[in-house]
């Protein structure tokens, strides 16, 4: 089992330090865990809110509006559920020593990209190539 790594709350990974050192990994682990916790809390709030809002609305327009709002909320929660799965996968990659490396090329993903999207699995260049290929196949 790995020893716990201590980093200050204001620590920010830099491009000029060794890539995916223990401090960087701990920084991204914390970032991912906090993001996951926020998403799960939002989900719990939504479930509680939906339980409280189950009521019979006599006006058809008001009922339709509430149903639309509820459907939108459920779609948002489904997206967040998928995001939680990606966060869990990123946490597994940290544990397995694969975090921060492009799954297509094996090259490091930039710290800047990982800070913006810590669930990224491809470098920016590989992601752009992937999206261009998808577009070509979709357009044909």
Image (cartoon, rainbow, N blue to C red):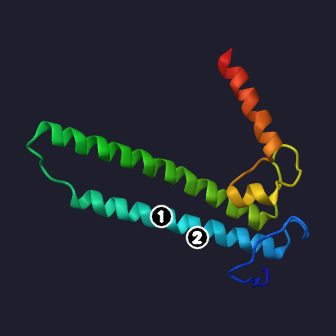
Q: Is residue 38 above or below residue 79?
A: below
Circles 1 and 2: CB atoms closer than 8 Å: no
Question: What numbered label is drawn on residue 34?
Answer: 2
- Percent of width and height locating residue 124: 79, 45
16 displayed left or right of 55: right
What is the C-alpha distance between the residues marked 1 and 2? 10 Å
The residue that appears at 54% across and 50% down in the rendered structure is 82
Dot 1 lies on which element?
Answer: helix
Most foreground residue, 10 or 135: 10
Q: Is residue 27 above or below residue 109?
A: below
**Classed neighbour count for the residue bearing mark 2: other residues with Cα under 10 Å, few (<14), some (14–19), many (≥20):** few
- Percent of width and height locating residue 126: 81, 40
- Percent of width and height locating residue 140: 68, 14
Residue under numbered circle 1? 40
Is any atom of residue 20 visible in this view?
Answer: yes
The residue that appears at 19% across and 54% down in the rendered structure is 54
Q: Nearer the viewer, mark 1 or mark 2?
A: 2
Q: Earlier in the sequence, mark 1 or mark 2?
A: 2
Question: What numbered label is drawn on residue 81?
Answer: none
The residue that appears at 50% across and 48% down in the rendered structure is 79
Most foreground residue, 69 or 3: 69
Q: Is residue 64 above or below residue 73?
A: above
Q: Residue 68 sits in which quadrant?
A: top left
The residue that appears at 79% across and 84% down in the rendered structure is 3
Dot 2 lies on which element?
Answer: helix
Can you say which quadrant of the picture contains the N terminus? bottom right
Most foreground residue, 5 or 95: 5
**Classed neighbour count for the residue bearing mark 1: other residues with Cα under 10 Å, few (<14), some (14–19), many (≥20):** some
């Amino acid at each position: 089992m790995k020893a716990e790594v201590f980093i200050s709350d204001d620590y920010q990974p830099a491009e000029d330090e060794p890539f995916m050192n223990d401090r960087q990994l701990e920084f991204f682990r914390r970032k991912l865990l906090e993001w996951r916790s926020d998403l799960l809390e939002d989900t719990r709030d939504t479930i509680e809110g939906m339980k409280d809002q189950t009521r019979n609305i006599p006006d058809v327009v008001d009922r339709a509006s509430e149903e639309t709002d509820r459907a939108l909320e459920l779609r948002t929660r489904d997206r967040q559920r998928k995001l939680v799965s990606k966060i869990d996968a990123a946490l597994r990659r940290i544990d397995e020593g694969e975090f921060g490396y492009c799954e297509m090329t094996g090259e490091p993903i930039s710290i800047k990209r990982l800070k913006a999207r810590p669930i990224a699995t491809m470098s920016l260049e590989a992601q752009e190539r992937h999206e261009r290929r998808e577009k070509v196949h979709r357009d044909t």
